[in-house]
């Protein structure tokens, strides 16, 4: 940490302390959480349908599959992107990519950003998916890879187990997530727009996001 950064941090903390100087300790420690935990009531199937709708609204491509059909679907998606190689994070079920038909690249300690930039696609699992926002969260757990693994390749296939990994809202997702883990929140493929609202995809992440809703 540089001295400038340290000085700025000290100034911010000093301002916080001054702002809380006249607040009793028991009140300062209390954070009100009386906000809505979800908007409306939905069945499990309705929550999954809402997730699919919001993912598509963010321009992700959404597919549904069971375990038996997943390997062929992943192979088809890789073929559509003309992928030459696919990154396989540690812990990803091997049967998912059994029919991939392209070079399988394993993540390792010596795997550099340059190596990753040469990979066409990445297949991952996820930690949780949020129906109301169409957001998928990865926490670096089994099959999810390192954060950079889903930011550098141009094509990301993410498998969401339904219904067990689907929640209605952000507050419900936070109850499942460990804030000390490296959380990556994904709402559609990477995109930005200029002042004239011309949309450009693939600026700081994958140009294409394929989401597979996997049932048992």
Image: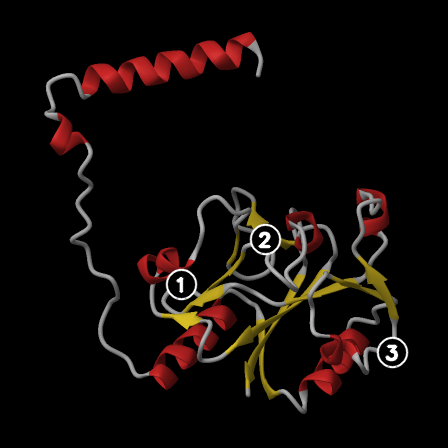
Q: Which mark is residue 103?
A: none
Task: Count neighbours of disc 3 (C-alpha within 10 A) and say few if under 14, some if 14 to 19, many if 20 or more.
Answer: some
The residue labelled by disc 1 is: 133
- Residue at 20% over, 34% down: 29
Is 66 placed above or below 212 here? below
The residue labelled by disc 2 is: 191
Q: Quick one: label 2 or label 3, which is nearer the N terminus? A: 3
Task: Count neighbours of disc 2 (C-alpha within 10 A) and say few if under 14, some if 14 to 19, many if 20 or more.
Answer: some
SS label for mark 2: strand
SS label for mark 1: loop
The image quarter containing residue 124 is: bottom right
Residues under labels 3 and 1: Cα distance?
34 Å
Marks 3, 1: nearer the viewer: 3
Tell me where residue 63 appears, x and y as whole percent.
Answer: 59, 81
Classify residue 102 as left or right of residue 140: right
Q: Quick one: label 1 or label 2, which is nearer the N terminus? A: 1
Is 182 placed above or below 3 here? below
Residues under labels 1 and 2: Cα distance?
16 Å
- Residue at 42% over, 79% down: 48
Marks 2, 3: nearer the viewer: 3
Q: Do the residues labelled 2 and 3 touch (CB within 8 Å)?
A: no
- Residue at 86% over, 49% down: 115
- Residue at 75% over, 86% down: 72
Please name whichever residue, 30 or 44, is drawn nearer the observer in this view of the structure: 30
Is 190 placed above or below 52 here? above
The residue labelled by disc 3 is: 101
Please name whichever residue, 26 or 185, is drawn nearer the observer in this view of the structure: 26
Query: Image quadrant for the C terminus?
Result: bottom right
Tell me where residue 162 appears, x and y as whole percent.
Answer: 48, 79
């Amino acid at each position: 940490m540089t001295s400038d950064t340290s000085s700025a941090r000290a100034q911010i903390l000093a301002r916080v302390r001054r702002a809380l100087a006249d607040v009793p300790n028991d009140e300062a420690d209390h954070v009100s959480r009386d906000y809505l935990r979800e908007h409306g009531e939905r069945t499990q199937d309705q929550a999954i349908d809402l997730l699919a709708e919001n993912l598509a609204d963010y321009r992700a491509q959404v597919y549904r599959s069971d375990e038996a059909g997943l390997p062929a679907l992943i192979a088809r998606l890789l073929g559509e992107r003309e992928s030459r190689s696919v990154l396989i994070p540690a812990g990803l079920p091997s049967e998912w990519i059994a029919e991939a038909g392209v070079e399988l690249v394993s993540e390792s300690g010596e795997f550099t950003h340059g190596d990753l930039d040469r990979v066409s696609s990445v297949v991952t699992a996820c930690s949780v998916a949020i129906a109301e926002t169409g957001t998928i969260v990865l926490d670096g757990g089994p099959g999810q890879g390192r954060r950079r693994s889903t930011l550098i390749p141009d094509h990301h296939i993410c498998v969401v187990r339904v219904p067990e990994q689907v929640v209605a809202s952000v507050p419900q997702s936070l109850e499942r997530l460990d804030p000390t883990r490296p959380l990556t929140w994904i709402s559609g493929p990477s995109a930005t727009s200029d002042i004239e609202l011309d949309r450009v995809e693939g600026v700081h992440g994958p140009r294409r996001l394929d989401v597979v809703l996997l049932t048992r």
